[in-house]
Structures are given as structure tokens and as C-alpha cells.
Amino acid sequence: MSERDPRIIKVKESILEDNDADAEKLRGELRDEKTFYLNVMSSPGSGKTSSILQIISRLRDKYRIGVLEADIDGDVDTRTMLNAGVESVQIHTGGMCHLDADMSRQSLREIGSADLDLVILENVGNLVCPAEFDTGAAADLVILSVPEGDDKPLKYPLMFEKADVVLVNKIDALEAFDFDMDKFTENVRLRNAAAEVFAVSAETGEGFDDAAAWIASAADEFLGGAK
């Protein structure tokens, strides 16, 4: 009997390709219902929740806003949102360190995205897995905090290659850390020349007017008019 070549199945590639197709379909569905879906990614402790609250405070008079909180477990951030008067739903990923398009679709259905203009996803906190899976969002926002260092775009390239906009949070602590804003921006540009970069402080609110204005402009372009 002749020797047969082994069958090789590229599982990850297949999964990602299927998810990419589903994500594109979801974007079309959200465009039709006029809902702007913003995917927020960062490492733990960068200030995602407090930054999202700063953004919401500037946009809630213009848009009906909801927040999806994705975590492996717990509901701390969802409680924070609800206490701030923000419609929010907790997503438990069952140990997975990311959300994909189908998880997004289920969560958007649960929060009632058809009745919202802007849905913000606070993705699971890390700089690796969330960047690998397209959630179906219209835009990807990455937050990096000053204590993490200005070299992160070089160490986690995919995250910054995927970003439409990057917020450098905790600039109120710049003097305490060896963080070079110009060097960081240069490192981002090496990965993604098109990404917008804003220096912000979720503690003081500095810089969030410009960041929120960028989000509003992106949302209006995607929505093509109010509901």
C-alpha cells in the first residue's frame, strides 16, 4: 500500500476566516439599524471603564448609549456603569480571552442595540487575544496607560495595527514614569500610519473632548444620519 500524505487542517485560520465573514455581515446589520458599535481594547488596569465614562459624559446628550462589559467572570464594571445611569449588560466569556462576532451579536441582541445609537464594548483586558478576532465593530479603540511604557506598539503589533484610534491614558502621571509621548506616537505610526492618537487623563478629563469628538465624527459617518 502506498504511503499517503497526512491531512492537515488549519483550524485557527478557518475559524478566523469564518469569523471575519460573520463580522462583516454583523457590521452590515448594524449599519442598517443605524447603531455604531465601538470596540474598546486594552490591558487590565489601563483605565477602560473610567475612560468610557468620560466619553459617555460628552456624548450622552447626542446619542442613546449602551455598554457591553466583557469579562471572564465578575460584574464589577457593569455595576459601575449602571450606577452611573448607563444601560449595560455583562458578558461572561467562559474562560475565553476575547469576543468574536457571534458573541457580539448575542450580546447586542440582549442589550437591544436597535434602540441605541452607540454601543461600546469594553473587551476582555489584554493586548493579545482581542486583537485577533473581529467583533463586527465599526471602529476599534485601544487604550494604553502611561505606566505601561511607550514601547508597547513594538511588543504587541497586531493590537496597534488594528486600532482606528489610540488613547494614551493617565497623562496626569507622566512625570512619575519614563514615558516619551513622541516616541510612543512614532512607535504607533510604525505599525499603523492612519491611527489617531490622543493623550488623555480619565482622572482629570483632559483630552477627552477631542477623543469624544473623533468618536462622534466616526459614528455620524457610519450612521449616515440620526435614527
Image: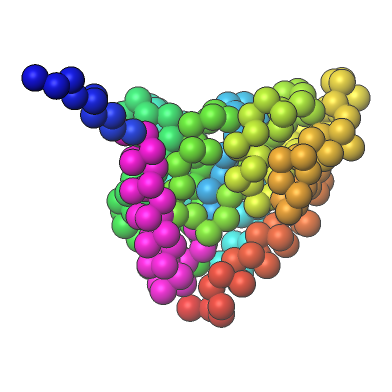
User: Image height check: is 222 above or below 20?
Assistant: below
Q: Can residue 32 be spotted in the picture?
A: yes
In front: 107, or 62?
Answer: 107
In front: 151, or 144?
Answer: 151
The range drawn in magenta is: 11-37
Residue at image location 65% in from the left, 33% down from the top: 157
Residue 108: x percent and y percent?
37, 55
Residue 150: x percent and y percent?
79, 28
User: Image height check: is 34 above or below 94?
Assistant: below
Residue 140: x percent and y percent?
58, 49
Residue at image location 35% in from the left, 25% down from the top: 95
Residue at image location 73% in from the left, 53% down from the top: 194
Q: Is residue 203 left or right of residue 224?
A: right
Which of the 4 image quadrants contains residue 177? top right
Q: Is residue 81 magenta?
A: no
Q: Is residue 64 left or right of residue 159?
A: left
Residue at image location 65% in from the left, 59% down from the top: 215
Residue 207: x percent and y percent?
80, 49
- Name the main secondary structure of what is drawn in magenta: helix
In front: 29, or 118?
Answer: 29
